[in-house]
Image (cartoon, helix red, strand yellow):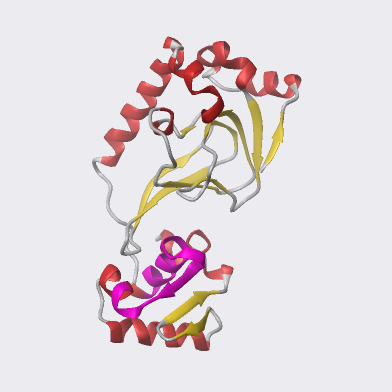
């Protein structure tokens, strides 16, 4: 991510979003955040939470269960809001947001400007409208269909520290499969150079090519 604090650039972005009036009281808190394709805007591992509004480009937001099942939440486009919930609670959220292409957003540091945001009635109304729409959409969510092989990759990338699976029995429990099934998949991935064995019952994901959002099969 690259940040821009140039006031003229910020003003141009404000003129391009329908949410400009709601941001007027927070104008001095704004900066422009730019992302390349595949960059994460939000994840449970990030230390800084940013409230963001999409100005250009698109993003995918999704939630990952402990068994590797993927819940696609939205394909965010112009004027889409990110990290509304984090304004009301401390700590990272559980949603991933990933740039589908080059992406430009208006952003505010939640940690630095939380009180200012909560004191703005216009801004709070914007948050309520956005969250209401997202809650309505979530009531019809289904997990994206994925094979066990795909879920193993997702589990290793997003649920294992350092992308390293340790302990076949525990991992098999989370993935709803047998240890024997999991071992066969890991053996195949090791042969294909996707994972490497680091110890007894331990494997590390080493090929980013097979990342969750890069695997077209997992979009289907």
- The part of the image, by quadrant, that contains residue 102 is top right
Q: Residue at x 73, y 19 (%)?
A: 7
The N terminus - image quarter: top right
Specify the principal SS of the magenta part. helix
Q: Picture coordinates of residue 177 (x, y %)?
A: 26, 76
Query: Relative to residue 111, is residue 124 depicted above or below?
Result: above
Judged left or right of residue 109, residue 73 is left
Q: Is residue 138 visible?
A: yes
Between 172 and 21, the residue placed more toward the observer is: 172
For this rendering, which residue is in front, 173 or 135? 173
Residue 117 drawn in magenta: no
- Is 154 within the magenta? yes
Residue drawn at 38 percent across, 75 percent down? 149
Give x and y (percent) for residue 201: 40, 83
Quadrant location of residue 156?
bottom left
Residue 54 placed where, x, y %? Answer: 55, 33
Q: Is residue 103 above or below residue 25?
A: below
From the viewer's perspective, is residue 25 above or below residue 81?
Answer: above
**Is residue 37 toward the left or the right of residue 140 in the image?**
right
* Quadrant of the image containing the C terminus: bottom left
Q: Residue at x 46, y 12 (%)?
A: 120
Q: Nearer the viewer, residue 125 or 44?
A: 44
Residue 84 vs 192, above or below: the answer is above
For the magenta stretch, what is the residue range?
A: 149-170
Tell me which corner region of the image, top left, top right, bottom left or bottom right, holds residue 53: top right
Number of numbered discs overlaid on the protein picture: 0
Camera sees residue 215? no
């Amino acid at each position: 991510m690259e940040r821009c604090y140039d006031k003229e650039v910020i003003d141009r972005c404000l003129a391009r979003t329908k949410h400009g009036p709601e941001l007027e009281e927070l104008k001095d808190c704004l900066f422009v955040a730019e992302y390349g394709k595949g960059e994460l805007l939000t994840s449970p591992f990030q230390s800084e939470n940013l409230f963001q509004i999409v100005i250009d480009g698109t993003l995918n937001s999704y939630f990952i269960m402990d068994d590797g099942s993927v819940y696609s939440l939205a394909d965010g486009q112009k004027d889409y809001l990110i990290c509304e919930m984090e304004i009301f609670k401390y700590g990272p959220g559980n949603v991933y947001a990933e740039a589908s292409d080059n992406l430009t957003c208006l952003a505010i540091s939640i940690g630095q400007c939380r009180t200012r945001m909560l004191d703005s009635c216009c801004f709070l109304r914007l948050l309520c409208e956005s969250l209401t729409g997202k809650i309505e959409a979530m009531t019809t969510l289904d997990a994206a269909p994925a094979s066990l092989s795909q879920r193993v990759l997702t589990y290793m990338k997003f649920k294992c520290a350092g992308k390293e699976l340790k302990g076949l029995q525990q991992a098999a429990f989370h993935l709803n499969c047998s240890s024997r099934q999991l071992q066969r998949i890991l053996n195949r991935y090791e042969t294909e150079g996707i994972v490497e064995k680091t110890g007894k019952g331990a494997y590390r994901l080493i090929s980013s090519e097979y990342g969750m959002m890069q695997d077209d099969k997992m979009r289907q």
